[in-house]
């Protein structure tokens, strides 16, 4: 399979650049549930580029690869650490799926390895602050600069929209789980005011979608869920969920650092951190992730996505129920 992919990538680059390109060192990277990343070297004749091909099956594509590449480049131009996108291909004739090509950055992406490295270097506070800064820079971008093909409405209330979506998902996927029903009622009773300013939101910034080195965060990955107009506290809350701490539960943001470090970086880059909206979004994101896990398990069971990662998703739902109860109890702070 890697030989077929390497041949297809070489053929695409040769046609795209207009001279012979040789591809070598083709190596699958750690794969997520939805798409694959392939590392390779491209010899352009006197110049070897280290690249990553991100293959996006059309059946589960959230954004067209060209739109995702565009918002990544927009963020990169505004200082957000993102790998440079080198090319986009929508023709499935080369490797069987649409793909984008990016520069390959050194660093670790596997969450537990990231946390071990951060602990070894004593860089948790710095990484937490860098995470806040990267998010603050993203939220400072004028969303009107984003592609009109990005989802999100300038006139809608993001909290109301998510609550309606979550209600529908729970009714369809988790109708017999009382904790989810209880959490939905809490969200409806505590619906926050619409923020003064809507921003671009990534929706999946977290430990696991970062490239991290000894010096800290080198890149934010996986922009397929980006929305054009959203509540910035959605991004802040998502990366603080317990499941993205990977056992280091006393460090709220990714297992790296406490809230103070994140907020320093975020406000230093121009972000406005609202603790009340943050709490609401933390509950909402936890519930939404539980529903998404149920959806992933269902996609495996009905044969839509035959991936063991999707199959294992359902076992996490009881953990989500515990998190919800802990977050909405009267004395909750996290």
Image (spheres, rainbow, N blue to C red):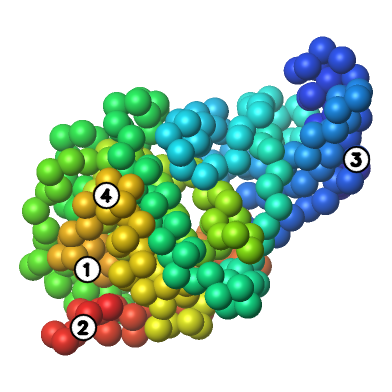
Residue positioned 18% across, 41% down in the render: 197
Q: Identify the residue under disc 4.
A: 271
The residue tagged with tag 4: helix, strand or loop? loop
Q: Nearer the viewer, mark 4 or mark 1?
A: 4
Q: Nearer the viewer, mark 3 or mark 4?
A: 4
The front one of 204 and 256 is 256
Spatial separation of the CA atoms under disc 1 and disc 3 = 48 Å
Relative horizontal placement of residue 147, taking residue 65 as reference (left or right): left
Q: Identify the residue under disc 1.
A: 279
The front one of 249 and 77 is 77
Instruction: Tell me which label, 1 or 2, sits earlier in the chain.
Output: 1
Residue positioned 24% across, 35% down in the render: 153
Instruction: Tell me which label, 3 or 4, sits earlier in the chain.
Output: 3
**Residue, far top:** 18
Residue positioned 27% across, 74% down in the render: 180
Q: Identify the residue under disc 3.
A: 24
Residue 332, numbered label: 2
Q: Quadrant of the C terminus?
A: bottom left
Spatial separation of the CA atoms under disc 3 and disc 4 = 43 Å
- Residue 141 in the image: state x and y as whole percent: 33, 35
Relative horizontal placement of residue 298, taking residue 111 as reference (left or right): left
Is the C-beta separation of discs 1 and 2 under 8 Å? yes
The residue tagged with tag 2: helix, strand or loop? loop
Is the C-beta separation of discs 4 and 1 under 8 Å? no
Residue positioned 37% across, 29% down in the render: 146
């Amino acid at each position: 399979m890697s030989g077929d992919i390497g041949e297809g990538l070489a053929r695409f680059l040769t046609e795209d650049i207009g001279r012979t390109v040789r591809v070598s060192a083709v190596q699958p990277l750690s794969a997520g549930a939805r798409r694959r990343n392939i590392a390779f070297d491209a010899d352009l004749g006197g110049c070897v580029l280290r690249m990553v091909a991100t293959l996006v099956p059309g059946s589960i594509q959230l954004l067209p690869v060209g739109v995702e590449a565009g918002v990544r480049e927009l963020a990169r131009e505004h200082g957000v650490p993102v790998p440079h996108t080198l090319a986009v291909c929508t023709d499935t004739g080369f490797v069987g799926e649409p793909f984008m090509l990016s520069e390959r950055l050194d660093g670790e992406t596997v969450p537990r390895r990231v946390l071990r490295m951060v602990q070894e270097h004593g860089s948790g506070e710095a990484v937490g602050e860098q995470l806040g800064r990267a998010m603050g820079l993203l939220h400072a971008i004028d969303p009107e600069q984003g592609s009109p093909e990005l989802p999100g409405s300038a006139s809608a209330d993001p909290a109301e929209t998510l609550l309606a979506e979550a209600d529908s998902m729970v009714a369809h996927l988790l109708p017999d789980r009382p904790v989810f029903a209880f959490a939905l009622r809490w969200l409806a009773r505590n619906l926050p005011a619409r923020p003064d300013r809507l921003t671009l939101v990534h929706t999946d910034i977290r430990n696991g979608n970062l490239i991290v080195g000894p010096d800290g965060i080198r890149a934010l990955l996986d922009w397929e869920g980006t929305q054009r107009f959203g509540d910035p506290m959605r991004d802040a809350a998502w990366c603080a969920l317990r499941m993205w701490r990977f056992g280091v539960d006393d460090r709220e943001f990714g297992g790296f650092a406490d809230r103070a470090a994140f907020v320093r970086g975020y406000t230093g880059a121009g972000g406005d951190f609202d603790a009340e909206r943050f709490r609401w979004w933390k509950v909402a994101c936890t519930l939404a992730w539980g529903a998404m896990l149920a959806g992933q398990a269902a996609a495996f069971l009905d044969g839509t996505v035959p991936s063991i990662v999707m199959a294992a998703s359902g076992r996490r739902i009881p953990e989500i129920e515990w998190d919800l109860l802990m977050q909405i109890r009267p004395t909750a702070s996290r």
